[in-house]
Image (spheres, rainbow, N blue to C red):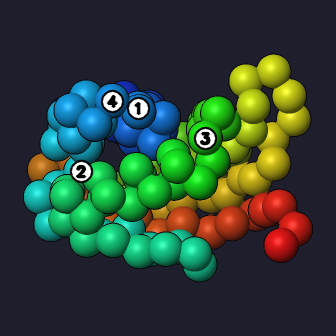
Amino acid sequence: MTDINTLVSNYIASFNETDADKRLALIGETFAEGATYVDPLMQSEGRHGIDRMLAAVQERFAGLTFKQVGKVDAYGDRVRFSWELGPADGPSIAGGTDFATVEAGRLAAIVGFLDFVPAA
């Protein structure tokens, strides 16, 4: 996989996929084997760690959907994109910007920044 827009699209899709087998397949296509993810609220390592993290996110935010906003920006092996989380038919409740490195066509290290989140 070398198309960066497809890679980011699959990344967002993996956050939304509730079928465990389909989600793990998307993760395998999208993330490098030893990929890492970190943001202010969570972190994980490896495809199975990322799968467990995404399952927990889906449980916490059941019924909400992640969507990409704006355009994907890439330079060399670096990529930046923004996302929002909310109901399909309403305003977003959270959003952020992720930065990632790409190795062999897959995401290798992702650092997420939260632009807005629900009040605690």
Q: Sequence-wise, which precedes: disc 2 or disc 3?
A: 2
Could you tell me how far apart the alpha carbons at marks 1 and 2 are, in whole angstroms?
A: 15 Å
Q: Can you give x and y, in whole percent of width and height, for residue 11 in the image?
A: 40, 41
> Which quadrant of the structure image shows residue 40?
bottom right
Q: Nearer the viewer, residue 113 or 53?
A: 53
- Indicate which label's residue lies in the foreground, 4 or 1: 4
Q: Residue at x 81, y 41 (%)?
A: 92
| Whether residue 78 is situated above or below residue 4 in the rendered picture | below
Q: Sequence-wise, which precedes: disc 4 or disc 2?
A: 4
Q: Nearer the viewer, residue 101 or 111?
A: 111
Say what amino acid the circle numbered 1 marks. Answer: Glu
On screen, residue 27 versus residue 100, left or right, reads left
- Indicate which label's residue lies in the foreground, 2 or 3: 3
Circle 3 residues within 10 Å: few <14, some 14–19, many ≥20: few
Q: Which mark is residue 19?
A: 4
Say what amino acid the circle numbered 2 marks. Answer: Phe
Could you tell me how far apart the alpha carbons at marks 4 and 1 are, in whole angstroms?
A: 6 Å
Q: Sequence-wise, which precedes: disc 3 or disc 4?
A: 4
Would you name the residue on which mark 2 appears? 31
Would you name the residue on which mark 3 appears? 62
Could you tell me how far apart the alpha carbons at marks 2 and 3 are, in whole angstroms?
A: 23 Å
Q: Sequence-wise, which precedes: disc 3 or disc 1?
A: 1
Say what amino acid the circle numbered 3 marks. Answer: Ala
> Which quadrant of the structure image shows residue 36?
bottom left
Q: Residue at x 28, y 36 (%)?
A: 20
